[in-house]
Image: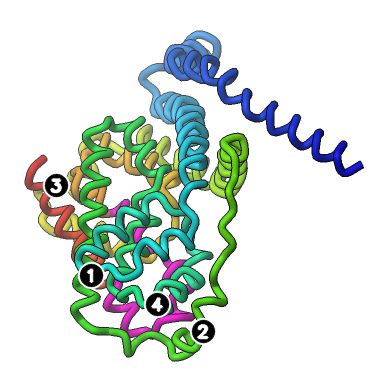
Amino acid sequence: MNECCSKDNNEKKKINYYIPFLLIPLVFVIYFFLERGVDYFVYEILKLDKSSHLTEAIRFFLYDTPKVFILLTVIVFVVGIIRSYFSPEKTRKALEGKPLFAGNIMAAGLGVLTPFCTCSAIPLFIGFVESGIPLGVTFSFLVAAPMINEVALVLLFGLFGWKTALLYASTGLLIAIVSGWVIGKLKVERFVEEWVYEIKAGDLQMDEQKISFIDRIQAGFTAVVDIVSKIWIYIIIGIAIGAAVHGYVPENFMASIMGKEAWWSVPIAVLIGVPLYSNAAGIIPILQALLEKGAALGSALAFMMSVIGLSLPEMIILRKIIKLPLIVIFISVVATGIMIVGFIFNWIY
């Protein structure tokens, strides 16, 4: 009976193995003809007025929703396979014994690839600290992981092009590296809760398992189901807000609030973004609409970075393992880095 069940599971894995290769041509066709299909549906079938604000909002929503979900599904599947090679335990071992600045660079890079969410902040933080990894290096990882994730990069690439995605990734990494380095230099170990140091690092170790490539394909499917099921509502809400901004906010209105001529636009964007909670999938459609209405790129990216990189749930969870002064230092250092990047972008663009 066990052999039968094992055979059935293997057959399922083989089926899953071939599904992506069967769907890839279909996805490309849908993506290529999506804009023309939406235009035909809105203007020819629904017969909506092209000059209407409502029509602009509806078209934005109908076009961006499938576009974002297609991009999201493809990239999460691919990155899900890549991430199957990077367990938190491997990440922890890779960072052990690294000097401060070199460790910051490596930690920020690994933060992009390692599976991470706010719910895993506590075990990762404890594991890093107990392994002797410097606190500043740990914070470089904590900054990079949520801010520079596959969702943010693929949506930026799909909606704004590779230059914007590359600039976001490089500046996000720079913020993570420098923020961690500064925190490390401040010697704030005394602000870590005492109970963290009392836990044995060995208690947190996980078994390393060798898995086949078919299993990694399955990991990609699992990642798609897990991530999309958790964030689809944020995508819909974000696109709906973006559609409303796109359709009803007057041209150049945002320039008076978040334009590069207003020096205070970057600090205001960060102050608004820090207490908010969203993820990349929810905030990027809003970012797109803000830019179309006259917001400066630096101000808009500063808003996005502050929402994603300094989310309120993460701060609440981190409060369980670090004291309030360190949370304030963490927010202040990262927010300052984000503002500097925002000013630079506004100056260049």
Q: Earlier in the sequence, mark 1 or mark 4?
A: 1
Q: Residue furthest top?
A: 44
Q: Which mark is residue 199?
A: 2
Which class describes the residues within 10 Å of circle 3: few (<14), some (14-19), or many (20+)? many
Q: Are marks 4 and 2 in contact (CB under 8 Å)?
A: no
Residue that label 4 marks:
129
Please state the extent of the stretch shown in magenta in the rendering.
Answer: 303-331
Q: What is the CA distance from the residue labelled 4 to the residue labelled 2?
A: 10 Å
Q: Mark 4 or mark 2: name the one nearer the start of the chain.
A: 4
What amino acid is labelled 3 in the image? Answer: Phe
Q: Residue furthest right?
A: 1
Give the residue type that dot 1 points to: Pro
Which residue is at the front of the view, 318 or 36? 318
- Label 1: how many Cα within 10 Å (few below 14, some 14–19, many 20+): few
Alpha carbons under labels 1 and 4: distance apart: 14 Å
**Residue 345, labelled with which disc?**
3
Please state which of the two labelled residues, at mark 1 or mark 4, is closer to the viewer.
Answer: 1
Q: Which residue is mark 1?
A: 99
Q: Residue 175: name its quadrant.
A: bottom left
Mark whose residue sits in front, 2 or 1: 1
Q: Work out whether 97 lies above or below 29.
A: below
Residue depicted at 59% across the width and 39% down the height = 212
Task: Tell me, yes or no, if residue 28 can be seen here.
Answer: yes
Looking at marks 3 and 1 on the same chain, the residue that comes earlier in the sequence is marked by: 1
Pointer 3 with pointer 1, Cβ within 8 A: no
- Image quarter (top left, top right, bottom left or bottom right) of the N terminus: top right
